[in-house]
Structure formats: structure tokens, C-alpha cells
């Protein structure tokens, strides 16, 4: 399997939730991804409160070579509701916005304690799958989600944060699912290598609410620790991307794209081959040793 086919394009950063994007830039980003051969897109009803699905629908209308996977259960303006009626309505609205009769699949969006009994959820999604509307069904887990409540062998896909800073549930949940989608390969920008302890995000970027203060300091220190083990010629984002793209345990990596230029590094790294074996091991060990950080810094979600 070519590494290129392991790429999915994550559309959250295009949605406006990371700051305003122009329509031209959104269209260019989507089209540039397709032209580069990246034919799978990940989105959600609440990215930009429905806007992102509508934008994908408008740009990709009629292009059946492109697969779109969206989410359900976390609704624009309303929050979470995983009841059968809410899931059906959510998927119906997504199809309208995406301008498609059928899609590659849906992930349940960030369930935590809301789903105590998976029975009705599975019944609802399985019916849509049997009707040919959804090719696959999956779960997009929140960090720390307890997958033991999920029945084995029912869901096709599972999506979870997986990057050089965080590989926890990626390892533990995998046996239950057919395919693993690693998301946030640059840790939502933390592994871009551009952040410093002085970085400040604009108020309309959702990271302004949580990527600051001691949390930012701790994360910047961990990115510095990664940078220190890299040889000349491999920067932090490139190491982060190649580590995941060549991990045999990962089926798809969802790369967040917020501007056309964000695709350049990805296109380059897809053609760059795996990292040297010893470097892959050093990076894995650094993660497993939790960057040797003190207990006082371990409660930040990462
Ligand atoms: N619970 C869920 O279901 C869930 C949660 C998170 C993500 N996701 C999905 O997974 C996708 C990927 O996650 P993510 O958006 O956090 O992705 P990511 O790939 O970890 O981070 C993307 C961000 O990194 C920054 N960046 C800096 N330099 C870059 C470069 N050269 N190339 C690309 N990005 C660069 C950009 O932000 P700046 O340049 O502004 O810093 C960009 O918005 C999302 O888009 C979404 O589809 C799902």
C-alpha cells in the first residue's frame, strides 16, 4: 500500500474554528489536496457549525473519486445527543450539506459518559450501513475514553489522537476495530516547531483558550526534547509526520490542513520514506518515558 493512500485530510482548521479563512483559501486547500492525490477527507457537523461540511459539499460536488467521512452525535449549537433520532437527523443533515446520497462513513463524535448502552446506537448506524448510506461506522474517541464499554467487532473505524506527544489510547483500543485513524499528527499545531513559550493565539482561534501558561511551557519543553534528538535535515513536523505514516499499526493519518501551504510539507514527507530505524526507536522511547517530566506537569491532557 502506498503511503499516500494512508493520508486523510482533516478539515477542522479550515472551518473557521482556528480563525477566519477566506473562501478562496478554503477552496484552494481542498483542490490542492485532491490534485496531490489525497482523496479522503475527515469532517464533522460542528466544524464551523455546519459550515465546513457545506464548503466540502460545494467544492467536491460530483467528485465521486473523493471519500468523505463525517461525524455524528455532537451537533452544531446543541451539543451532544447520541439518541437514535438525533443520530438519524444529524446524518441526514450532513448528507444534505455534503451534497451526497452516501458517504464513506461516520464516527460517533467524542462520546464520554453519554453512551451507557451501545445497543440503540449500533442498531441505528447499522441500519444506515445496511441501506448503503454509510460504508463504514466508527468511533472518534475523546482523550482518555474508556473503550471497554464498546462491543468488540461492531465498529469498522476508530479515530484517536496519535502523535509524538500522545500515543496512549492508540495502543490500547486498537484490537476492537478494523481500521485505526491517527488524528492530530502535529498535535493541533504544537508539533509545528513554530511555538515558543511566548506564543499567543488570536481570540478566534480555539487554541487561545487552552494552549497557554504552564501547559504551553510544558509542551514547548517536550517539543524541544524531540528537536534535540533529530539529525540535521529532519525538522519536528517532518519527523512527526513520517513517524506516523510509516507506523505499521496505523491505517490512516488525518492531517489537519488550514491553508494551502500546509500541504507542502505533507506532500514532501509522503515521498520521503520512513525515518531511520534507530530514530524511530529513540522517538518512541522519549514518548514512553513521558519526556522524563515531573508529576506536577502530567495533568494537561497531553
Ligand atoms: N474529536 C475529534 O473527532 C477530533 C479532534 C481533533 C481532530 N480531529 C480531526 O483530525 C484532524 C487533524 O487534527 P488537527 O487539525 O489537530 O491536525 P494537526 O495536523 O495535528 O494540526 C494542524 C495544525 O498544525 C498547524 N501547522 C503548522 N505548520 C503546519 C504545516 N506545515 N502543515 C500543517 N499544519 C501545520 C496548523 O495550525 P497553525 O499554522 O495555525 O498553527 C494546522 O491547523 C482535524 O482536522 C479533524 O478532522 C477530530
Image (cartoon, rainbow, N blue to C red):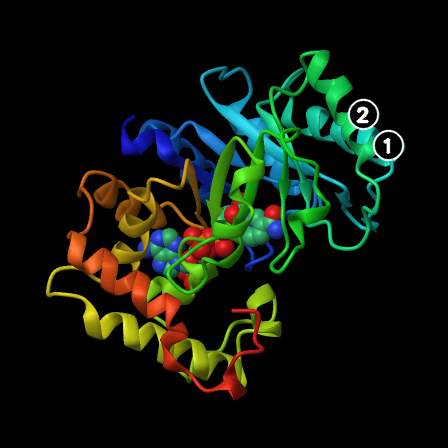
Beta carbon at label 2 within 8 Å of ligand 1: no
- Check whether the beta carbons of the residues at disc 2 and disc 1 lie within 8 A of each other: yes
Residue at 45% across, 57% down: 167
Residue 13 seen: no
Q: Position of residue 46 (x, y in %)?
A: 69, 46
Residue found farthest to the left: 232
Residue labelled with disc 2: 123
Dot 2: element: helix
Gap between marks 2 and 1 measured at Cα: 8 Å
**Foreground mark, 2 or 1?**
2
Q: Position of residue 259 (x, y in %)?
A: 41, 49
Relative placement, left or right, of 182 versus 291 is right
Q: Which mark is residue 84?
A: 1
Q: Position of residue 219 (x, y in %)?
A: 43, 76
Q: Is residue 164 depicted above or below 228 in this figure?
A: above
- Residue 50's image quarter? top right
Residue 45 seen: yes
- Viewer-proximal residue, 4 or 55? 4
Q: Is residue 55 depicted above or below 296 in this figure?
A: above
Residue at 79% across, 38% down: 118
Q: Is residue 128 depicted above or below 156 in this figure?
A: above
Disc 1: CA contacts within 10 A as few (<14), some (14-19) or many (>=20)? some
Amino acid at each position: 500500500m502506498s503511503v499516500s493512500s494512508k493520508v486523510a485530510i482533516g478539515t477542522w482548521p479550515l472551518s473557521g474554528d482556528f480563525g477566519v479563512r477566506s473562501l478562496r483559501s478554503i477552496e484552494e486547500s481542498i483542490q490542492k489536496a485532491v490534485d496531490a492525490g489525497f482523496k479522503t477527507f475527515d469532517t464533522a457537523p460542528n466544524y464551523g457549525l455546519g459550515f465546513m461540511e457545506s464548503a466540502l459539499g460545494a467544492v467536491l460536488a460530483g467528485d465521486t473519486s473523493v471519500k468523505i467521512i463525517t461525524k455524528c452525535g455532537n451537533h452544531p449549537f446543541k451539543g451532544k445527543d447520541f439518541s437514535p433520532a438525533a443520530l438519524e437527523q444529524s446524518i441526514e443533515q450532513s448528507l444534505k450539506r455534503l451534497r451526497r446520497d452516501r458517504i464513506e462513513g461516520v464516527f460517533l463524535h467524542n462520546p464520554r459518559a453519554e453512551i451507557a448502552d451501545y445497543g440503540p446506537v449500533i442498531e441505528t448506524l447499522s441500519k444506515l450501513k445496511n441501506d448503503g448510506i454509510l460504508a463504514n461506522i466508527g468511533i472518534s474517541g475523546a482523550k482518555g475514553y474508556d473503550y471497554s464499554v464498546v462491543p468488540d467487532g461492531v465498529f469498522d473505524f476508530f479515530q484517536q489522537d496519535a502523535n509524538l506527544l500522545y500515543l496512549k489510547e492508540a495502543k490500547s483500543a486498537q484490537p476492537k476495530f478494523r481500521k485505526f485513524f491517527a488524528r492530530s499528527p502535529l498535535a493541533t499545531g504544537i508539533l509545528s516547531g513554530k511555538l515558543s513559550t511566548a506564543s499567543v493565539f488570536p481570540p478566534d482561534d480555539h487554541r487561545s483558550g487552552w494552549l497557554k501558561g504552564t501547559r504551553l511551557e510544558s509542551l514547548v519543553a517536550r517539543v524541544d526534547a524531540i528537536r534535540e534528538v533529530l539529525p540535521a535535515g529532519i525538522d519536528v513536523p517532518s519527523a512527526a509526520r513520517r513517524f506516523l505514516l510509516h507506523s505499521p499499526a496505523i491505517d490512516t493519518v488525518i492531517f489537519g490542513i488550514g491553508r494551502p501551504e500546509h500541504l507542502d510539507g505533507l506532500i514532501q514527507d509522503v515521498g520521503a520514506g520512513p525515518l531511520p530505524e534507530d530514530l524511530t526507536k529513540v522517538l518512541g522511547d522519549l514518548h514512553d518515558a513521558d519526556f522524563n517530566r515531573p508529576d506536577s506537569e502530567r495533568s494537561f491532557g497531553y
